[in-house]
Amino acid sequence: MAAFSCAPLAAHAGLFDDAEARKAILDMRTQIETLQHDMGNKADKGSSLTLADQNDQLRQEIARLRGQIEVLTNELSSTQQRQKDFYTDLDTRLRKLEPQQVNVDGKTVSVAATEQKSYDSALAAFKNGDYKGAIGAFGDFLREYPQSGYAASAQYWLGNAYYAQRDYKNAIAAQQALVKNYPDSPKVSDAQLNMASSYTELKDKVNARKTLNALITQHPDTPAAQTAKDRLAALK
């Protein structure tokens, strides 16, 4: 019996990995088969009392080993489920970090999670009236993501943030950068309208009219063009 008097394994089941747990289960099953074989071999040997005692001890050992197998089997199942849950959660987290396809001004672009978060944060600052914070945030965004699908929009809102701060010269410069760098953006006509407003605030009617006329000529079918016509009439 000394060969089978090993310390209970249940307390250590949590320390096993899958391979170790499976090996322990197989080892204990082998021990059970050996014990059952010994019980059969002892049937023809010794006194009935001695055999009864030995068989009783063997049965107790078999019951103990079967109990440990059940504990290890349950622990192995729980470990496998935890691993499955872990990898499912990891896969979900990784998917959130992958670039997503989004629609920006009618165009589908690929946007990374950090890129989206940076743009949303800057836009939120603008909408909340934190124009100084928005200027810094949009400036950082454009430096970090110059090729972003949001770049033209970021440039446009940067100009508007300067305008809201009454920094008309920087507002004009920001919108001029949009017109130059993103000529195909739907934001161009609105950027030109913002530039004209900045020129008007600076009492520069010549450039205000020039900008409005350029807007009407280049983008005649936009809502901004109709607004430009109304403003031209007011400037005369």
Image (spheres, grey):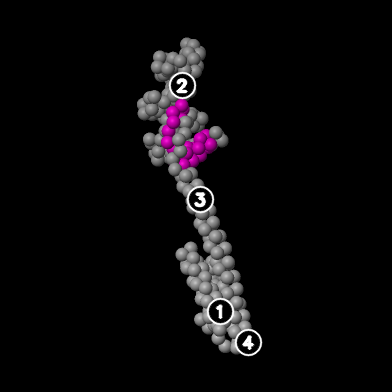
* CA–CA distance in space, label 2 to label 3: 50 Å
Q: Counting other residues with Cα less than 10 Å from the Cα at mark 2, is it few (<14), some (14-19), or many (20 or more)?
A: many
Q: What residue type is labelled 4?
A: Leu
In the foreground, 115 or 188: 115
The mark found on residue 193 in the picture is 2
User: Where is mark 4, residue-wise?
Assistant: 49
* CA–CA distance in space, label 1 to label 4: 14 Å
Please tell me whether mark 2 or mark 1 is closer to you in this view: 1
Residue 210 visible from this viewpoint = no
User: Where is mark 1, residue-wise?
Assistant: 39
* CA–CA distance in space, label 4 to label 3: 58 Å
* CA–CA distance in space, label 2 to label 1: 98 Å
Q: How far across and how far down the image is residue 205, in percent? A: 44, 17
User: Where is mark 3, residue-wise?
Assistant: 88
Q: Decide whether residue 3 is among the magenta residues.
A: no
Q: How far across and how far down the image is residue 60, in percent? A: 61, 77
Q: What element carries label 4?
A: helix
Mark before the other along the chain sequence, 1 or 4: 1
